[in-house]
Image: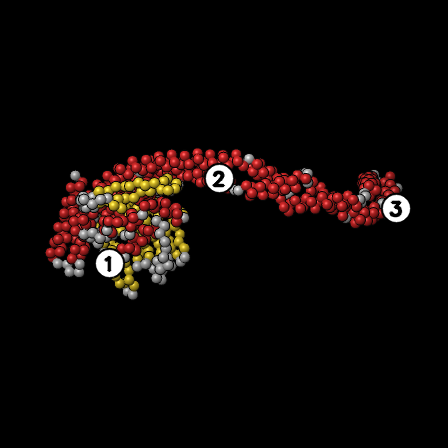
Amino acid sequence: MLVHLHVKNLALIQDIEVEFGPGLNILTGETGAGKSILLGSMQLILGGRIAKNMIRTGAPYALVELLFQIEDEKVQKELEDLEIYPEEGQVLLSRKILEGRSISRINGETCTVGQMKAAASCLLDIHGQHEHQSLLYPDRQLEILDAYGKEKVEPSKAQVREAYHEYRKCLQTLKELDTDEEQRNREKAFLEFEISEIEKASLRIGEDEELEKLYRRLSNSRLIMETLQTVHSLTGYNQGAGDAIGSAVRELSRVTEYDTELETLGNTLGDIDGLLNDFNRELASYVEDMTFDDETFYETEKRLDLLNGLKAKYGKTIEDILAYQEEQQKKLEDIDRYEERFREAQEGLERAKEKLEKFSHDLSEIRKDYSRTLTEKIVEGLRDLNFLDVKFNINFNRKKDFSANGYDDVEYEISTNPGEDLKPLGTIVSGGELSRIMLAIKAILADRDQIETLIFDEIDTGISGRTAQKVSEKMAVIGRSHQVLCITHLPQIAAMADTHFEIEKHQKGMETITEIHPLDEKESVRELARLLGGAQITDAVIQNAHEMKELAQVHKTARLK
């Protein structure tokens, strides 16, 4: 459950910390005191949008922190699936809001807003003032049904999603194949031309590198010849380096007999003479063998131009060109067996459709089974909320097309008065009635999801009198198995509080700030009197508030027995 809330520098809130208790936590206060800001701070943890004016004027940042005590093993398992591990049974969610950005953290570790939202959705469920309006949309109605039956619905929906993606893939394949004969003939002719052009070239891997090497040598043959002749002259034995070294060898040999240590130098110089002699012989042989053939140069240049032209069209290397040829060959073969492939694609689509039809049917049957139980639960919950003669039904229709969610289109129908036919929700219910229906649904889903903390923002919209009393009793019942935070204006609901908080706005110097503090028994009665009597709180109103509080306690005690 939510044990601690800390909000700092958010709109009218300067710095507040609240310790929430188990059961029903009621928050009341004057209109405009900042109740919506408090709820908005929690919405930020659920990934809510950040308004430009959200940070308190003059403050460098705003901060929201929610500390949860995890007691349910199922919730702990869901968190662990998200790689979130409670520390001493606690999880701290925080979001720091700065100019133009925000920083989210879970147990002190930075995370994305999406990760924060996923974690928060395991821990609390917020019902805002206008959320009940979503009940008017068929998609939301189907979503509620799926959430109620998720044990069996989710695995079945996974099968449908997979089958649907396969079906769409088959549709796309058939669409791509569905071309006219003239277009196929044009494509075939083009493929045959490309394949023929590559085949005629008789490509050999590595040939381009060999030709480029040969082309460089042939195109620079004159320069090579002149250079080699110069080198041969400089290192040869006709007034070149060879002559000089030969003379040096002879001179050194005259004195080696007088000093044995000179033999090593003499041997080295002799090796140099031998090496230079070998070099000159090889150089002379290379020059003698080197020829320049204009025809060879022309053929080499022509072949290189052909290869470079193919590279420009089909790939950067010969390997790429050959791979492209193979790819185009496969396309040509596919065109040649077009009729066979088209028939195979049609058969594949038919199989995919049959599979999708089966899985969608199975999903629909699972939904229908759960819809009967959910209908009974909703009727029971609505009767608890003063819909005494209510009838409710979940009507199934089939969509024209398949979707990743199956083919079901559901519509909630209701009759709130005796003798009235069942009609769609949006055609007969008021805002207050819709709010109560959503309350009944939230209570049902909360029991199945085991979400420990439920937050209701002014669930009392459009109700009063006996209906308000019924809503308060329902809230008290939910508070027995869940932690409930409820913002309300109705004394009937506030009287049921296990813990009562007052939110108030007041001046502090030149600033307006919002504060929240828990109320003891006496203060709670006085706040109930304010809700009952408005600005004029008489002794009679206070007495009435006392009685309301006592009756609420009697009702809660009776429920516990």
What residue do we see at 29% from left, 65% from top?
A: 510
Element class at badge 1: loop
Question: In the rendered structure, which amino acid carries the disc numbered 2?
Answer: Leu
Checking the image for residue 493, the label placed there is none
Alpha carbon distance from label 2 to label 3: 83 Å
Element class at badge 3: loop
Question: In the rendered structure, which amino acid carries the disc numbered 3?
Answer: Asn
Task: Provide residue 31's location: percent of width, then percent of height.
Answer: 24, 58
Q: Classify 357 as above or below 310.
A: above
How many C-alpha atoms fall within 10 Å of the one at disc 3: few (<14), some, or many (≥20)? few
- Which of 102 and 315 lies nearest the eye of the viewer? 315
What residue do we see at 77% from left, 43% from top?
A: 296
Residue indicated by mark 2: 174
Alpha carbon distance from label 3 to label 1: 115 Å
Left/right of residue 181 with respect to residue 197 in the rendered view: left
Name the N-terminal-most of marks 3 and 1: 1
Quarter in which the C terminus is drawn:
top left
What residue do we see at 25% from left, 61% from top?
A: 506
Q: Classify 109 as above or below 31.
A: above
Question: In the rendered structure, which amino acid carries the disc numbered 1?
Answer: Thr
Residue indicated by mark 3: 238
Residue indicated by mark 1: 31
